[in-house]
Image (tube, rainbow, N blue to C red):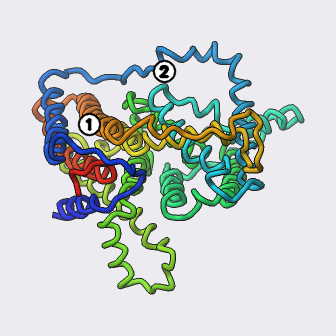
Amino acid sequence: MKSVLILLLLLAAVCGAQAHSFEERYDLPVPLAYVIVGACAMVLLTFVMAFLFVRRPAAGFVTPAALILPKPATLRPREWLLKSSSLLLFALTIASALWGTNDPLMNLAPTMVWIIWWIGLSFVVIVFGNIWPVLDPWRSSFELLDTCAKKLGIKRGLALGLTWPTALGMWPAAVLLLVWCALEVIYPLATAPFKLGCVAVGWTFVNLAGMVGFGREVWQGRADFFAVYFSRLARTFRPSSRGSEGEPIAGHASLILAMLATVLFDGLHGGSAWLVFEGALKAWVPQWLDVNGYVAGTLGLLSVWVTFIVAYVLTCQISAAATSGEISGQQITHQIAPTLIPIAAAYLIAHNFSNLLIQGQTMVALLSDPLGRQWDVFGTAKFYPDISVVDAKFTWLVAVTAIVLGHVLSIWQAHRVALRWSLPMRRTAWVTFPLTLLMIVYTAISLVVIAAPMVNDVQ
């Protein structure tokens, strides 16, 4: 019953959700309800097809990176150039944020951080695999300092080798990902270049201190949420990558669910359902405590995340009951979690595709005048984005395709992961069927939320 109420509340948000919206709206050739039913039917059909035709568990899927990118051995000659360029661009971004204009549209930092890096690099990682380790300025900085320390006679380098508490697991990365989403959606960080620069400098000190204390691999695998986020996003086509096997890591599933929740919350924030939630909160919270809506926003984000966690854990417990105790709920929760990554990737694409193509064009002008000082270094300062490069119809088609394919891929991968447990086929189907029902609910919600700012059918 709670899941139904939550679904109804989310569906009510379509009348007012305006995140990443278009001024131009698209008239659907068929009612939105037909699109939703067709998409949900496709997810259900995938479950049936997997049950009928898939009999062997898969080690993973081949990503385009394996066919396009050079082998690691041949990447070495280019690695230094990539790392150096990334460090220089990072320094330029920090300088723009701290000493450039306060106008976010004229300052390089906001567009570089939120559009080119956070969204653009995420798209690249989904398609080609995780290239972030090569571009990571914090990793490069630590490696440079560590190399210098060893040359100065410190044999073990900078890392102190402190033991990471097992109970912490990946919870720091999950919580920090939520904090990052709050800074983007709830707080005015996205429109305040100087504050953005201060956060970047602060995170640099925290990140380097964590690598010194616990070692680079441990810190970046447990607390550096950027490194963890990109590494998980790169597993869109590889559900069996390291981290889904072996002993469960505390907070691993919650981190993946945070990847879903943050994008969905971005779409819901500001909608009619959100206004209802905020209004109800004001009746219980003193107005002086939440003048800017930060408390309501934080509680809303946490509510979406917790809802995802509760729904997923309950679904996995139901699936465990179908195995008659042969597979524990914890094991299912841990091993199935990576198969949700395609949904996170789908939400990201559907929600940000047009944003990247349109706002990303502003980088042409910003690179000529990164600080907003009326420079024209490359002669492109007068460049204006072409907003006709993508319209509402094309964005809607991309969004629907991404959401459907993301959920279809998730169901397919979940079935192949379940085959590892060597259960009879009928029992395997019963294990994955509750997850399929959950995916159908996710599909309906995501389509309605994405449709709100783009199509006229939902008005």
**In the rendered structure, which amino acid carries the disc numbered 2?**
Ala
What is the CA distance from the residue labelled 1 to the residue labelled 2? 23 Å
Residue 404, label in figure: 1
- Mark 1 or mark 2, which is nearer to you? 1
Q: Quadrant of the N terminus?
A: bottom left
| 86, 258: nearer the viewer | 86
Question: Residue 4 placed where, x, y %?
Answer: 17, 60
Question: Residue 330 placed where, x, y %?
Answer: 31, 47
Q: Is residue 201 above or below residue 274?
A: above
Q: Residue at x 25, y 30 (%)?
A: 412
Secondary structure of the residue carrying tag 2 is helix
Q: Crowding near pointer 1: few (<14 within 10 Å), some, many (20+)?
A: many
Secondary structure of the residue carrying tag 1 is helix
| 99, 377: nearer the viewer | 377
Answer with left or right where residue 108 lies relative to residue 402.
right
Q: Is residue 254 visible?
A: no
Query: Splitting the image into 4 quarters, where does residue 42 fall?
Result: top left
Q: Residue at x 69, y 19 (%)?
A: 78
Q: Residue at x 22, y 59 (%)?
A: 7
> Where does label 2 land, which residue?
65
**In the rendered structure, which amino acid carries the disc numbered 1?**
Val
